[in-house]
Image (cartoon, rainbow, N blue to C red):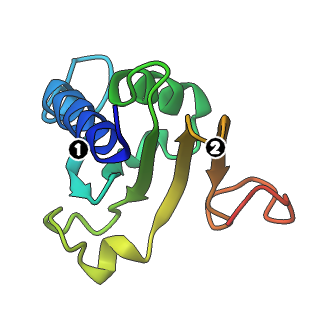
């Protein structure tokens, strides 16, 4: 498969994953809103009460990112409750919570907290 074919497969996998997560809400956990996709990057709104809960991110990443596939996700808070849509309103864009990058081409995976959310903003892994 050429690069274009791989990109299409990754994009379709991301869309399928989004459809499986968008609007899903259980009584036990708040909804993580998948706002959309910009290129290959999925944009997700994190419930305020889970913004610092790494295990909650891991659960969502398992739903959003098929195993052994390139996957990019940007997570944001929406403390003002504005409508989540693309392009992101400034009120949401200015509240990054975390980002996840998995590149199968480079064999790398990285989860980074936003320095505004990180417990220790001196952490070299925050952005």
Measured as percent of width and height from the top left, residue 72 is found at: 44, 47
Which residue is pictured at 23% across the width and 78% down the height?
89
Evaluate whether residue 52 shows in this view.
yes
Secondary structure type for disc 2: strand
Measured as percent of width and height from the top left, residue 4 is found at: 29, 47
Secondary structure type for disc 1: strand
Residue 114 occupies quadrant: bottom right
Residue 99 relative to residue 29: left or right? right
Q: CA distance from mark 1 to mark 2?
A: 19 Å
Measured as percent of width and height from the top left, residue 17 is found at: 24, 28
Q: Can you identify the residue that label 1 sits on?
A: 33
Residue 66 sits above or below residue 57 on the image: above
Which residue is pictured at 79% across the width and 64% down the height?
121
Residue 15 relative to residue 65: left or right? left
* First in residue order: circle 1 vs circle 2: 1
Residue 60 occupies quadrant: top left
Q: Residues within 10 Å of mark 1 (few under 14, many from 20)?
A: many
Point out the image quarter for the N terminus: top left
Residue 122 sits above or below residue 48 on the image: below
Which residue is pictured at 26% across the width and 33% down the height?
9
Closest to the observer, 24 or 38: 38
Measured as percent of width and height from the top left, residue 90 is found at: 31, 82
Circles 1 and 2: CB atoms closer than 8 Å: no
Q: Can you identify the residue that label 2 sits on?
A: 111
Which residue is pictured at 31% across the width and 78% down the height?
91
């Amino acid at each position: 498969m050429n690069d274009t074919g791989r990109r299409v497969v990754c994009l379709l996998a991301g869309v399928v994953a989004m459809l499986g997560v968008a609007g899903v809400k259980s009584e036990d956990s708040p909804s993580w809103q998948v706002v959309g996709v910009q290129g290959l990057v999925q944009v997700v709104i994190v419930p305020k009460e889970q913004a610092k809960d790494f295990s909650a991110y891991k659960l969502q990443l398992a739903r959003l990112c098929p195993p052994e596939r390139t996957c990019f996700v940007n997570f944001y808070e929406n403390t003002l409750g504005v409508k989540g849509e693309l392009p992101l309103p400034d009120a949401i864009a200015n509240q990054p919570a975390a980002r996840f990058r998995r590149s199968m081409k480079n064999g790398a995976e990285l989860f980074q907290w936003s320095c505004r959310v990180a417990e220790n903003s001196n952490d070299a892994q925050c952005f």
